[in-house]
Structure formats: structure tokens, C-alpha cells
Amino acid sequence: MRRFAIPAIIAAGALALAGCTSSGNGGAAAGDGGDDKAAAAVDEVGILVPADPGGGWDQTGRAMSAVLTGEDLVSAAPVTNVGGAGGTVGLASFANEKDPYSLIVTGLVMVGAIETNGSATRIEDTTPIARLTEEPLVVVVPKDSPYKTLEDLVDAISEDGQSVVVTGGSAGGADHILAGLLLTEAGLDSDEIIEKLNYVPNAGGGEAVTMLLGGNANAGISGVGEFAEFVEDGSMRALGVSSEEPAALLPEVPTLTDEGYDVVLTNWRGVLAPGGISDAEAQALADLVTEMHDSGQWQTTLEDNGWSDAFLVGDDFDAFLAENVSSVGDTLQSIGLVE
């Protein structure tokens, strides 16, 4: 059996994560000598969530806003939602952002969506700031589903194909990748996955919940935090989580490996700044996010949401992101989601 983990299929070499020129909000623009000066303390930071309300990115952006203001790290941290196409609509909008003290929530979903959507705006057009969290995914079915085990569901997709509707986040994102990896483990090749997998993407986690509870989808895949309350109240049944160990929010649910599918996949989330900002501006944002991460309120937020602390900043995050962009592209090709 093959084992998949993201990031685990690492292609050789690293991408140069270079940004476009931008300026604003009193900060020094790249190339105007600002790199030689200390950036002013960040008083206000805008947070763009590139998804509709209700999903993991929205939860992350709003949690950041609450902690940044609650800990008096900034005077304001307004959140704006611009959903669509796995975050690439919001990313394209963010590329034109003139205020250097702005952040966009990002993660594995966006990395995959850029490839599947052929997005003209890419991660490489931004300034990496920090990775914040990791979260396992969970495969669920409605409470009255005939699929009692993960094997029941995977076998049904393999045999009945398009009649089994699987919903989750954006096309090419973590949820879609996990569906493809499960079918790969079941022995399907990339052409068979394309033919049989009826995956219905959504711009936000709330839409997937509506489809499942409304009887318009046979199964769903999303972050544990997005489905946990529905599993706990009995309206959904969890078939497996994608982490190596049981998830904190759903400790009784078996892992995919326990269920016979040697697949491990965690969904990371982090933040980016506009491309082309000065080194001093980027450092000011990195320092701000580090203060947020180190606060007691953020640690409580991690525990409450079942998010694993996966903090990386600076060169470490740059290197991780370069590897992730490369490895996700390779994985999407291997399971037939991109050519």
C-alpha cells in the first residue's frame, strides 16, 4: 500500500517566492530605501478571507481578528470575505492591495486551487508571512446513510461512480485531494478517478453542511472543526479522520489508516502579505503575527477549535511554502486532477 502525506511528495528544488511592487498606509515601499529603516508599529491590519463565511479560512481569519484586538496588538483588524474558486478570486483581488499592512488567509486549499483553476495570480506573487495551524480532515455521511464504514463509501464510488455525490471545499483543495487519494488507495488509476468521482465543490464550509443535511450529497469531506458539531449531535456520522492519530475534537473516530487506507493528509493554514512590500514592512507583520501566536488567547483558540499549532515564520515558512507548491502540483497530477 502506498502512503500519501502533504507535504510529503517533495520535488527537487525550491521556487523563488518573489512579490510585486506595492506601497501604502505610510509604510515604505520596496525600492524606496524603506528596507534600511525600521517599519512603524502596525496599528491596524486588514484580513482578507478568500472564502465565504462558515468555513475553516473564515474561522481562522475571524479568530485572528479577535485575538489581535483582544490582546491590544492592533487597534482594529477588520475581516473581509471574497469567496470563489478555492481562494483564487480573493487572491487575485489581494494582488491589487496597496496597503502593505494587509493579510490574506491561505493554505493547502489555495495551493491546489491555483493549479486546478490555472490561476494567473499565484502564491509567488505575494509575501509569505507565517504558517499558523494544521487540521486533519474528516469523511462524513448523513446519519441515515447506508454507508456504515469508509470501505462501504469507497466501494460505492468505485462501483457506482457518478451516482455517489461527494461534497467538500474547493476543486483541487485538500478535501478534493483526499477523495482522490482514497480512490487511488482502492486501486483506481487517474482516468478512473476522473470518470467515477462526482465531487461537488463549495466556496465555504457552510454550503457543504447544507448539502449534506438537505440530502443533496451522499458524503462530505472537510476539516474536523467544520463538521465536529454535526457529528456530535448525531446529524452526521464520521467514517474516518486523515491524521496519524485520532483527532482531539473527534477522539472516537478511527483514522483512515485504521480503516485500511494508508493515507495521511493535514490541511495547513497561514497568512500572506501583498507582494513587493519592503523587508521592514514584512518583518513588522511577521513580528505582529508572532506576538499573536505567543499570546494566551491564541493558544486557547487553538484548543477550542481542535487546531494543531504548526507555527512557522521567516525563512522556515518560505522553504515550506516553496516545497508545498511543488509537491501539491505533483500530487494533483498523480491522481488525475490536473494534466
Image (tube, grey):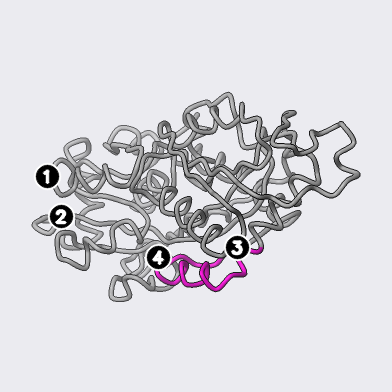
Q: Nearer the viewer, mark 2 or mark 3?
A: 3
Q: Earlier in the sequence, mark 2 or mark 3?
A: 2
Residue 325: image quadrant is: top right
Q: Nearer the viewer, residue 137 or 97?
A: 97
Number of numbered discs visible in the structure rendering: 4
**Residues at circles 1 and 3 in contact by the CB criterion of under 8 Å:** no
Q: Is residue 46 left or right of residue 247?
A: right
Task: Let me know if residue 15 is in the magenta part.
Answer: no
Q: Earlier in the sequence, mark 4 or mark 3?
A: 3
The residue at which mark 1 appears reads as 215
Q: Is residue 29 left or right of residue 253?
A: right
What amino acid is at disc 4? Asn
Q: Earlier in the sequence, mark 4 or mark 1?
A: 1
Helix or strand or loop: what does disc 2 sit on?
Answer: strand
The residue at which mark 4 appears reads as 305
Label 3 crowd (10 A; few <14 / some 14-19 / many >=20): many
What x and y, as percent, mark residue 123? 62, 37
Q: Earlier in the sequence, mark 4 or mark 2?
A: 2
**Residues at circles 2 and 1 in contact by the CB criterion of under 8 Å:** yes
The residue at which mark 3 appears reads as 292
Helix or strand or loop: what does disc 4 sit on?
Answer: helix
What is the C-alpha distance between the residues marked 4 and 1?
A: 27 Å
**Compared to 275, does 230 lie above or below?**
below
What amino acid is at disc 2? Pro
Q: Is residue 209 left or right of residue 103?
A: left
What is the C-alpha distance between the residues marked 2 and 1?
A: 8 Å
Q: Earlier in the sequence, mark 1 or mark 3?
A: 1
What amino acid is at disc 3? Met
**Compared to 228, does 41 lie above or below?**
above
Q: Which residues are magenta?
A: 291-310
